[in-house]
Image (cartoon, grey):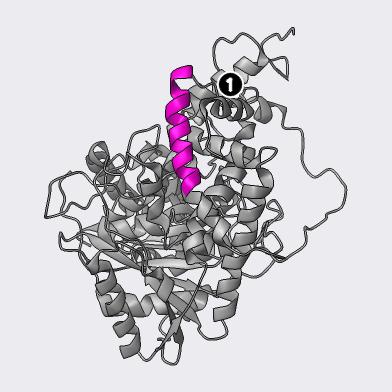
Amino acid sequence: MSDLTSLTLTDAVEALKARRVSSEELTTAFLGAISTANPALNAYVEVTADKALDMARTSDARLARDQGGPLEGAPLGVKDLFCTEGVQTAAGSNMLRGFVPPYESTVTANLWRDGAVMLGKLNMDEFAMGSSNETSAFGPVKNPWKSSAQNAELTPGGSSGGSASAVAADLCLAATASDTGGSIRQPAAFTGTVGIKPTYGRASRFGMVAFASSLDQAGPITKTVADAALMLRSMCSFDPKDSTSLDIETPDWSAALGQGVKGLKIGVPREYVVDGMPAEIQALWDKGVEWLKAAGAEIVDISLPHTKYALPTYYIVAPAEASSNLARYDGMRFGHRADTAANLTDLYETTRAEGFGKEVQRRLTIGAYVLSAGFYDAYYVRALKVRRRIAEDFDKVWGQVDAILTPSTPSAAFALGDKQIDPVTMYLNDVFTVTANLAGLPGISVPAGVDAGGLPLGLQVIGRALDEATVFRVAEALEDAAGFTAKPAKWW
Amino acid sequence: MAIDAATVRRVAHLARIKTSEDRLEPLAAELNGILAWIAQLNEVDVEGVEPMTSNVAQTLRLREDEVTDGDKLSAVLSNAPKAADGFFVVPKVVE
């Protein structure tokens, strides 16, 4: 066991179970790696070293008795969007700086029930609104990857940039993340990691800081597809505390692996060829098609005609829901409160102007606008109707195909600061991922190759609602064929 | 439908976000850029389409109307900007 931190989650769990390594050793190795790397990468906003070592020793005691859950002793990172009892949960915002939840999110509670160890909380775009981690009040996360073409510091993507950066740099075995428009899959693609957003309703939203409730869904960022299958199972559960939680059993997705894709029908949607898409993205997509064909799948040309309307629909629905969700930050019961104000309205307005960053303010303003009298039908209701059209596009193709293959992102990771000029340019990052959120479908990003500068690129697999099993099978076939083993060179 | 500074002022107030006068014009320009891009939704034929508010095809669950939680006074107040004697303390408002 030369380098403990580079183990996959699956291998680490096995090594722990076989007692070839203790959780305390593993946890100590990660804490060491974090203290070296974090000043450069800024992936963790808080490291819970004492708590991690306590949890690790408890796991070691259980393992010594041949007990323990499916993740017993495995050190994980937690996106700072999940409430963790007694540990600051700020969601990347000054509004929640210092907020210490007196309760635990269901997703993290499930992980601890299954024996996982918490290393700390991971940086993210403020309230998950961003695609580059630059909106975080705790400073941007750096991508451990650098392009051979230039020495610029790159974004790890967002909003789960801290999670993706930490997994890619071996600062945890795997991490929790969340995805409202692509916030798991885009950062996974930018960092050479695997990220899956399950079917809406699989993972409980209880204790997740809300952004857009009809779209928000938790999922893991991991090093391999098998790791994602293992960790997602622990994260998901039926939860009476979330009214949209699905009252169904969580399958053992690890069992779906190893079956291959022979006979599966894979759709390739022609509308996902977008203007200005780099040739290497198209080439990677073509390669993915060839890989799946070679593995015995049948490729079907499909049409999802409303694809181009998905992003504009999202930029009405998500800000509208956010403007309603974030109304709770009024400075009265928790969070930031302005020191002085002339009257009550002024207190609300000053509190929110001080507590929210620029992008959050922009989205809340759009949300208030599209919900306001006179514009509600023209914008919000119309967007909800187009959303149904988008969902129906998928319903129509499920008769012909079992899963859909697309690129994960329209480019590789870009330099920090590059896309801050125009909000719409930044929004276009999610062009391939946002449809799955609007339709509530599972989607995974798998590292499949590198661009000319050696930066990772991902392919996305979208599946039927509740059919993560097929998504994992196709993802595994891509992973096997791609043989992606590149790691970022340590510059930190 | 272009947004002007006065509209931004009104909407920012609806969102309860204090916005300084010199920010109104730049914000109007940004919002107009976003809304011009969003305007392509007008191309879609949505005649007779039911608005989609959720992608969960289940009706909301009901539970027994009984107390299942409570006695959490200190937990509830633990993150208050200011609290005293078991209450949230807020600035005096006389209007």
**Range of magenta residues:** B21-36
Q: Residue at x 49, y 22 (%)?
A: A354
Quadrant location, the C terminus of chain A: top left
- What residue is disc 1 on? A349
Q: Is residue A483 left or right of residue A123?
A: left
Q: Position of residue A425 (x, y in %)?
A: 36, 48
Q: Residue at x 56, y 9 (%)?
A: A340
Q: Position of residue A195 (x, y in %)?
A: 41, 62
Image quadrant assignment for residue A240: bottom right
Q: Is residue A117 visible?
A: yes
Q: Is residue A174 visible?
A: no
Q: Position of residue A170 (x, y in %)?
A: 28, 54
Q: Residue at x 17, y 44 (%)?
A: A152
Q: Tag 1, which chain?
A: A
Q: Any magenta on residue B30? A: yes
Q: Nearer the viewer, residue A52 or A240?
A: A240
How many numbered marks, from 0 up? 1
